[in-house]
Amino acid sequence: MESLTLEFKREYSKSLVTTIAAMANTYGGMILVGINDKVEPGTERVVGVDAQDTIDKTASGCREKFEPPWEPTFIPVPFDDGSGRSVVVIRVDTNVAPRPLLIDLKAPIRLSGQNSTADRDRFLKLAREEPSAGVLPTGQNVMSPNLDRDNEGNPVADFILRTGINLPMGEAGAWRPLSERSVAALAQALNTRPSLPP
């Protein structure tokens, strides 16, 4: 399900670059390219893309459209079916992105899982933010989620994808990078499931 910090894209489009800027100017998050955002009967949810082509187009769009130029982190998760297709995870970290990140002299932001444009007050607030504003003060912890379990104690979900948080602890959410184990679990789950639940 799409949210403030998570978005699905079937393939590269110009709106993908705007979404990257909007996430960078808000709480950060992840965009999964190669996954249908709307599930209709008879439509596959996970379709995959050509990873290198998608990364090249997205990186080029970021360099051309962003002021100042900036690129997020790209993580290709290849299918193991020999198709050569992948899901490309685009990680947008607000702690390393310049703020405000502008497109055509406007600052895109995320509101309720959609892109919008910052008004004058929000724009000024973004311009005044310190680069480390997204870091939690020392001593605060964000608890790890617990997977629901069946009667035998086995997890009923394949994985939980944490893209950011939205807690009353300040203007920016905290970011925890994915570990190699988490990326491997995500790849395994995507490879073994025919489609993700809506």
Image (cartoon, rainbow, N blue to C red):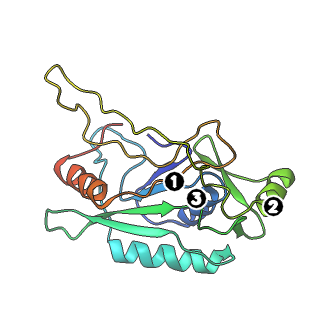
Q: Position of residue 22 (x, y in %)?
A: 63, 57
Q: Residues within 10 Å of mark 3 (few under 14, many from 20)?
A: many
Viewer-nearest of discs 1 and 3 = 1
Q: Quadrant of the N terminus?
A: top left
User: Which mark is first along the chain, 2 or 1?
Assistant: 2
Tell me the CA gap for discs 1 and 3: 18 Å
Q: For mark 2, give the secondary structure.
A: helix
Disc 2 designates what residue?
A: 128
Q: Is residue 111 above or below residue 91?
A: above
Viewer-closest of 104 and 142 = 142
User: Which mark is first along the chain, 3 or 1?
Assistant: 3
Task: Tell me the kind of residue under disc 3.
Answer: Thr
Dividing the picture into quadrants, the one containing residue 94 is bottom right
Q: For mark 3, give the secondary structure.
A: helix
Q: Position of residue 105 (x, y in %)?
A: 78, 69
Q: Is residue 165 above or below residue 179?
A: above
Q: Residues within 10 Å of mark 2 (few under 14, many from 20)?
A: few
**133 relative position to 179: left or right:** right
Q: Quadrant of the C terminus?
A: top left
- Residue 175 numbered tag: 1
Seen at 21% across and 71% down, the residue is 84
Seen at 67% across and 58% down, the residue is 25
Disc 3 designates what residue?
A: 19
Task: Tell me the kind of residue under disc 2.
Answer: Arg
Seen at 34% across and 71% down, the residue is 51
Q: Position of residue 65 (x, y in %)?
A: 65, 75
Q: For mark 1, give the secondary structure.
A: loop
User: Which mark is first along the chain, 3 or 2?
Assistant: 3
Q: Position of residue 128 (x, y in %)?
A: 81, 61
Task: Tell me the kind of residue under disc 1.
Answer: Trp
Farthest residue in the front direction?
139
Seen at 45% across and 63% down, the residue is 90
